Amino acid sequence: MLKLFRAELDKYLLEVKTYYPDQIVDMVVKYILFATFFYGFVYNVRNSTAYCVAYMYWIIASSIISELSMSISFEKQVGTIEQLIIKPYPFWLILTVKTYVVLLITALKGALLFAIIRITLPISLVFNINLVWILLVSVIGFTGVGLALSGLTMKFAKTASFESIISYGLLFFSGTIIPFDKMPMTVQRVLNVIPFTAGINASQKLLDGNSQVLYVLLWLLLINLACFVIGYFVFNAFFRNVKTNGVLNNY
């Protein structure tokens, strides 16, 4: 397992080093988005730390979800996906390990981004170590969504449109553009059962000193495990389908 993590980490770091201009552009775009939303929508309206947490969740969730399906699409395009399948690890486990590699690199990039934001924008941030544990629980659910999209990619090859819809949908419902308490009550109830928004809500309750944080954490763990299990079964269903029909390498 550790060897698999090291291999995926080395591979991802090589990609980052090779295509570093893309990483710089990505950081600049995310900085501009942050500044635009912060000043245009929520400045002096919400707690700035809660806003940053929501934005960080969006960065990590969208990176994980898109990276898994993009890697499948690339492997199919170059015809090397079967080499992944014959490795001495289950295919879904390889993708799950890749998730945590992406999490690590994205978190480091996010930390750098927020360091720049802290220096260049009039914003104050408060750090609580428990926010990290909430994020790690939430990543379980992100992985489930990523696995489900990876299954779709194995079947249909190109799912960029799905990724874009999911990514910008997550941004909209993260509370970054419109705070949760400003949304209709029905929408708030629906968002409470979605791992992404439930994680953000749990973080905000923690920052607000809410006494029901333990209950929120248990609920968060439950829905994230459920999301992972659903994503796992969706992935395996598509995986069996493409193997049975012999279209695994079709692109």
Image (spheres, grey):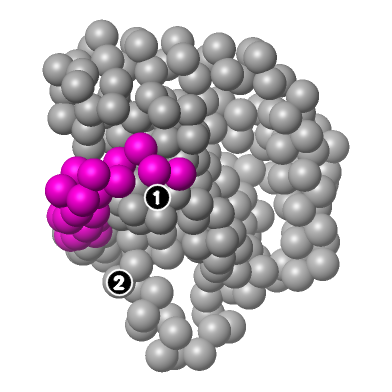
Q: How many marks?
A: 2
Q: Amino acid at mark 2?
A: Val
In this view, the residue in front, 176 or 217, is 176
Disc number placed over residue 179 in the picture, else none: none
Image x and y of residue 24, in percent = 76, 28
Image x and y of residue 109, in percent = 61, 29
On the question of residue 64 being in view, the answer is no
The range drawn in magenta is 226-251
- Of the 4 image quadrants, the one containing the N terminus is top left
Image x and y of residue 91, in percent = 22, 32
On the picture, is 84 further left or further right than 170?
A: left
- Residue named by callout 2: 193
Q: Earlier in the sequence, mark 2 or mark 1?
A: 1
Q: Could you tell me how far apart the alpha carbons at marks 2 and 1 are, in whole angstroms?
A: 25 Å
Q: Name the residue at 64% across, 13% down.
A: 17
Residue 120, magenta (yes or no): no
Q: Amino acid at mark 1?
A: Thr
- In the rendered image, the vertical position of residue 139 relative to residue 110, given as above or below: below
